[in-house]
Amino acid sequence: MHAEPVIAMISFFGFSAFLTYMYYNTRHRERMALIESGKDAGIFKSLPKGLSSLKWGLVLTMIGLALGIGIFTDYTLGHDGPLVTFPLVFLFSGIGFIIFYKIIKDQEETEV
């Protein structure tokens, strides 16, 4: 029996658990430090429900658009691998986040 797959799985899940622990531990320490110094810990509040759905809707739509364009381009150019598709997913998801940022900034400016 080969030990490499077992070691790889244990390492993957162990590292994932470690990152999750560190994320929540650091966030808790930052909040406690803010509260102890008398500052508001409201900066950690998440987006309202509708805005979160808007953000992920935009990003997933842009990823779907990137996949469509990339697959079409790969097919028409005759490539076997994801030569164009892979970079387009990152490009279009970034564009989706930028569009969401612009929408939020415009909304904040109209509220003030």
Image: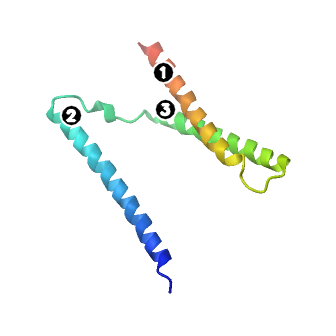
- Report how far apart the C-alphas of labels 3 and 2 lie in the structure: 26 Å
Q: How many marks?
A: 3
Q: How is the image coloured?
A: rainbow
Q: Nearer the viewer, mark 1 or mark 3?
A: 1
**Lateral position of residue 56 relative to residue 43, left or right:** right
**x%, y% of residue 102?**
53, 23
**x%, y% of residue 47?**
42, 33
For the point 20% across and 28% down, which residue is it? 39
Category of crowding for the residue at label 2, using alpha-carbon neighbours closer than 10 angstroms: few (below 14), some (14–19), many (at least 20): some
Q: Which mark is residue 105?
A: 1
Closer to the chain start, of discs 1 and 2, is: 2
Q: Nearer the viewer, residue 84 or 93?
A: 84
Q: Is residue 20 above or below residue 26?
A: below
Q: Quadrant of residue 60?
A: top right
Q: Find out whether the residues at labels 1 and 3 contact each other: C-beta distance under 8 Å.
A: no
For the point 53% across and 35% down, which residue is it? 55
Q: Is residue 60 above or below residue 16?
A: above
Mark 3 is on which residue type? Leu
Q: Which mark is residue 51?
A: 3
Mark 2 is on which residue type? Leu
- Report how far apart the C-alphas of labels 1 and 2 lie in the structure: 26 Å
For the point 73% across and 45% down, which residue is it? 70
Closer to the chain start, of discs 3 and 2, is: 2
**x%, y% of residue 36?**
14, 35
Question: Which residue in the protein does label 2 denote?
Answer: 34
What element does badge 1 sit on?
helix
Q: Nearer the viewer, residue 8 or 111?
A: 8
Q: Find out whether the residues at labels 3 and 2 contact each other: C-beta distance under 8 Å.
A: no
For the point 51% across and 27% down, which residue is it? 101
Mark 1 is on which residue type? Lys
- Report how far apart the C-alphas of labels 1 and 3 lie in the structure: 12 Å
